Every structure is written in C-alpha cells, then in structure tokens.
Image: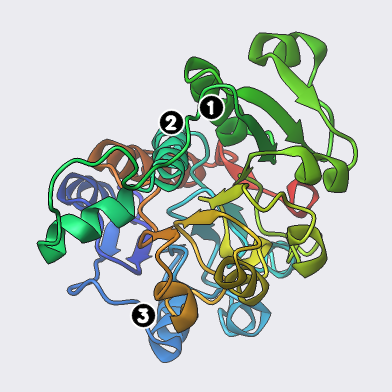
C-alpha cells in the first residue's frame, strides 16, 4: 500500500518548473493569482495542510499558528528570512520551520553593488533627464557623481551576503570595513581585506558608503536610527538590500531632504509597500521594488530547496534547512 501524499499549500505563485515538481511529489494546492493570501485564507490553509509554503508577504504569527490544529507539521518557507514567522511558537506546537538560505547570496550582493554604483554615479537622475527629454548634450560639469574606487565601504552584517558584497567591493577598489555580532575568523577577514569595527557608531562616522546586510531581529530594529544616521558624513550614502526595519525610514527621509546625507539606495522599506511619499519624491535616492533576489535562477533554486526540505521531512528526517529559535 502506497503512503498517502502530503498535503501542501503554497501561498504565492512560484516559477512553473517549481510548481510542476511540487505537484508531481505532493498533494498540492497552488495559488491561482499572484496576490498575497488574506488573513482568512491563511487561517484556512494552515488548518487544511500538512505543510504550508509561505513567503515574506505572509505574516505567520502566534495567533495564526494557534489556529493550526494538529495537522500542520512543517512550515517550509520560500525565502531565507523568517522574521515573518513566529518560529518559537511553531516549535512549541511541534511545527518545524525551514527556509532557503544561500541561494540568493550572489543575486542580492550584485544588486547591492548596483545600488552603490547607481547612487554614487547619480544614475537615477540621469535616467530622469533622458526620460523627460531634457538632455541638451554632454557638459563638463553635468551630473557629476563620485568615483567608488578608494571609498570606504562599511558593511553592517557580515554573513553570506555581506561577505559577497565585500568581494565585489574589493574588485571595485573599495576599502572594506564591517560591523558584525561576532568578528570573522582571521583567515576570512584577511581574504576579504576587511577591517573590523566593534563599535558601530565609530564605523558609521568614518564611512563613505554604508551597506545594510543584516537580518531583521528585535536587536536590529532601527539599528540605523536617527542618532546613528546623524553620525554619517554629509557626503556619505547608504544602501539597504536586507530588511527595511533596520533603518528608521522617516529619520532617513528627513536627513536626505536636508542634505545631511548625500544619497540612498533602497530595495526594502520599513512598512512594506507603504513608502514615505516624501522619500519617493527625492532625486538623491534610488528606490527599487524589492528586486534584490529577483533572478529566475535564484527563484528556481529557492523552490528546489523548499522541495528538498519537504521531501526530507516526508521521508522521516530533519529538513536540511530547519530553523530553530536559537539560530535567530
């Protein structure tokens, strides 16, 4: 007698090849349109499935997990970040949580460097001139940006992505500095030619570019608050491809408007799609719609990790990318 197939609910549309493979292996309920599930739809899904496959757009909090009943056994997150999932409550209720780490490292690091270049070289302003049809030809002093080579880059969070950003910055001739919860091993630090700062305040005050590459946790919420942003040099820029909550968005907007910070490149925002309209109106910012990991290759690899986690669990083993509260 064949084993009953796991019931899996996927909350968003995934690449076709991922959805096809999920359908071959499991009893899958796929999303017909690419809108986030409502709270009511998530509550229904969490009671009907053995496995839930959510994304960053789904708030899987303690109250929702409390409605799951006894059927739900695994939350196989499609994404590396799990700050939208109450991992501790899930664990208490015997529900495993897995994620998809590592596969988006290079894609996100590429986008970080793209933002650094776009902000320092004023690319958005140049594009706006062209799109408005205002360009009158080359001029020696028009849209002068800054050279990235030789600049000090301060990386906030030196995990996989932070280190990948450091390697790219090396190739552009930037001086790499970093602040992290724990100092890197000496051989890694030497390979990246990176200077460690125990004091984030001291690092921020001396950098030309700040790159936010740390996860959102209670300890990193508004890590770049108004006081710390004021430590930045007026000619410095800040980019964020990690989590919007790490930066106090309103304080950043005020300082950019006042010319107290030269510019910013943001791919994530403190309140999701609800972006400060004054920030959107500024010329010295490059704003992207959470595109940091948006490559087809990366999205397919994320799906493959989800499938491996579910299949390993179904075979009676610990998912290779299981997340536990002590990791957060």
Q: Residue at x 59, y 31 (%)?
A: 160
Residue bearing mark 3: 37
Q: CA distance from mark 3 to mark 1?
A: 33 Å
Secondary structure of the residue carrying tag 3 is loop
Q: Is residue 194 above or below residue 190?
A: below
Q: Residue at x 52, y 71 (%)?
A: 71
Tell me whether the residue at label 2 lies in contact with that at label 1, contact meaning CB atoms closer than 8 angstroms.
yes
Answer whether residue 132 is visible to the viewer in this image. Answer: yes
Residue bearing mark 2: 106
- 296 or 26: which is nearer to us? 296
Q: Earlier in the sequence, mark 3 or mark 2?
A: 3
Q: Position of residue 196 (x, y in %)?
A: 81, 27
Q: Is residue 9 left or right of residue 221?
A: left
- 228 or 61: which is nearer to us? 228
Residue bearing mark 1: 164
Q: Position of residue 84 (x, y in %)?
A: 58, 67
Residue at the right extreme of this rendering: 199
Q: Is residue 82 above or below residue 12?
A: above
Q: Earlier in the sequence, mark 2 or mark 1?
A: 2
Q: Earlier in the sequence, mark 3 or mark 1?
A: 3
Secondary structure of the residue carrying tag 1 is helix
């Amino acid at each position: 007698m064949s084993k009953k197939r796991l019931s899996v609910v996927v909350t968003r549309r995934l690449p076709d090849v991922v959805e096809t493979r999920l359908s071959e292996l499991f009893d899958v309920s796929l999303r017909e349109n690419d809108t986030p599930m409502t709270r009511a739809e998530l509550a229904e899904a969490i009671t009907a499935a053995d496995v839930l496959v959510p994304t960053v757009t789904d708030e899987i909090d303690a109250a929702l997990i409390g409605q799951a009943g006894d059927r739900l056994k695994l939350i196989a997150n499609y994404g590396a970040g799990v700050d939208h999932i109450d991992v501790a409550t899930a664990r208490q209720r015997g529900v495993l949580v897995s994620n998809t780490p590592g596969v988006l490292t290079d894609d996100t690091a590429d986008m970080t460097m793209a933002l650094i270049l776009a902000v320092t070289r004023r690319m958005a302003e140049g594009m706006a001139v062209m799109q408005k049809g205002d360009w009158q030809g080359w001029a020696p002093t028009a849209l002068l940006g800054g050279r990235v080579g030789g600049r000090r880059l301060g990386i906030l969070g030196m995990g996989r992505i932070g280190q990948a950003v450091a390697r790219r910055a090396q190739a552009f001739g930037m001086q790499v500095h970093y602040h992290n919860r724990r100092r890197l091993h000496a051989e890694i630090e030497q390979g990246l030619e990176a200077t460690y700062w125990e004091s984030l305040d001291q690092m921020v005050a001396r950098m030309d570019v700040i790159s936010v590459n740390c996860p959102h946790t209670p300890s990193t919420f508004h890590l770049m608050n108004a006081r710390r942003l004021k430590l930045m040099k007026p000619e410095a820029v800040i980019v964020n491809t990690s989590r919007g909550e790490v930066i106090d968005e309103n304080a950043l907007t005020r300082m950019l408007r006042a010319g107290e910070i030269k510019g910013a490149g943001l791919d994530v925002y403190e309140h999701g799609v609800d972006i400060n309209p004054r920030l959107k109106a500024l010329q010295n910012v490059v704003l992207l719609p959470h595109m940091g990991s948006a490559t087809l290759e990366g999205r397919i690899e994320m799906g493959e990790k989800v499938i491996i986690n579910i299949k390993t669990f179904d075979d009676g083993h610990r998912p290779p990318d299981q997340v536990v509260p002590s990791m957060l």
